[in-house]
Image (spheres, rainbow, N blue to C red):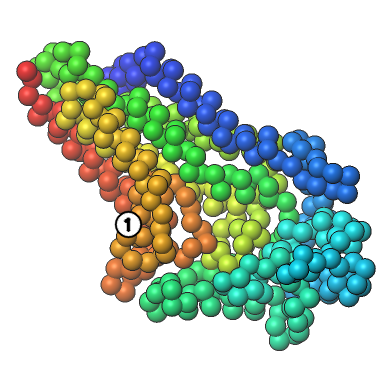
Amino acid sequence: MLVKYEFLKILRKKSTLIVMAVSLVLTGFLFGLPMIQFQIYNQDGVIKGAKGIAYEKEQFADLSVPLSEEYVAETIREVQGLFEDPDNVGTDGNEQFLVGDAYWNGVAPREKLLNLIADTYSSPNDSWGYNHLPEVEVKEENPFYQAMKGKIQTLLDSPSRALTDEQKEYWGGMADKVGIPLQYGYHGGWEIIISSFELLMFALLAICIVIAPVFSGEYQAGTDAVILSAKYGKTKLTTAKIAASLLFGTVAFILHVVVACGLPLAAFGTDGWNLPLQIANTTIPYPYTFLQAALINIGVIYLVLLAMIGVTLLLSAKMKSPYAVLIILVPLLFIPMFLTPNGTTGAYNLLLFLLPYRSTMPEFGKYISYQFGGMVFDVLTVRAVLYTVLTVIMLSLARLGFKKHQVA
């Protein structure tokens, strides 16, 4: 009953309703922008919005196929054949590309797939598009999946990454678990979701703003003396306040996730949920489907939220004003937005990847790992463990802080 009372106390505040309404609208706007801004071209010009999305999905209708070695080799030969006709080829002075019907009929409907295939054969420091396919030699001893594995190994061996032998073995073992041949297909909605997770930081801040007065609001209103002098004020009621804060945070987070994922999936469709991440980038080592990747990162973001609620409650228990809580909390959440990693190793970079803002980004293709002795962990695992531990510590300190508060 106490938890229900405290939960309703949070929920019925006018400020809660305003902050949550603004946050949900902002989340809807940010995650809805890709649909509004979407555009694709055909020979007649640009197609925008819902019509453009429908047109792109039509283009993918014949591309839902396993990327077998035979299919990839035949696709490369088809493009190479188009480049053999000089009438099909244009140039910008630096690179050649296909023009006219050769492009619109032979490339445009499957350009993303062709770029994916071409880039798999490129060196780690290059980014190849379909116009580099004439440079690829289609031989039995250089098949697509061997090139894919070779590129991953080259990335792992790169001196700039400074990976240890244990880390190379860890990532190589993970990449070996990716099932082949890759199943290709449309995945527009999922690609947008996975690339936009950091936008949920505004939702996390909004939830913390609502939670900020849980303890400090009592100090401000002068009701702390009544609560702490009551029979269960320092025990059950304090626990109820923390539980209600976690419950509110969970409900609010679910609502934001529904909006954030629901809008792209409603616009672009759920197609591709069971397809591998590697059809977006063949050097991604995680053996996940788009749905699995999305759910795992949402889980990590939820743990970040719980830890931030813990930090907010601790500050609320120590400070006499909710505004003082936010003065500390807002920079903590948003200053890391302006800090850029200069690599994937080194203390600065590894710490940066664990801060709240960066922790909302999955970083699936960056081989970020943490080594403790002979044990290696990927960044997603370390984030999950770190924020779980922080949640337990911060909530315990918040509870202790309110219990030991000295009434003025």
Quick check: 147 above or below 250? below
**Quarter of the image that includes the C terminus:** top left
Residue 269 in the image, given as x and y percentages of width and height: 70, 41
**Quarter of the image that includes the N terminus:** top left
Q: Disc 1 marks which amino acid?
A: Leu
Residue under the point 60% across and 52% down: 290
Dot 1 falls on a residue whose secondary structure is helix
**Pointer 1 residue:** 351
- Neighbours of disc 1 within 10 Å: few (<14), some (14-19), many (20+): few
Quick check: 91 above or below 50? below
Residue under the point 70% across and 40% down: 38
Quick check: 41 above or below 178? above
Question: Relative to the observer, which residue lies in front, 39 or 271?
Answer: 39
Which quadrant of the figure has residue 249? top left
Question: Relative to the observer, which residue lies in front, 244 or 69?
Answer: 69
Left or right: where 257 falls relative to 347: right
Residue 25 in the image, given as x and y percentages of width and height: 54, 25
Residue under the point 34% across and 19% down: 10
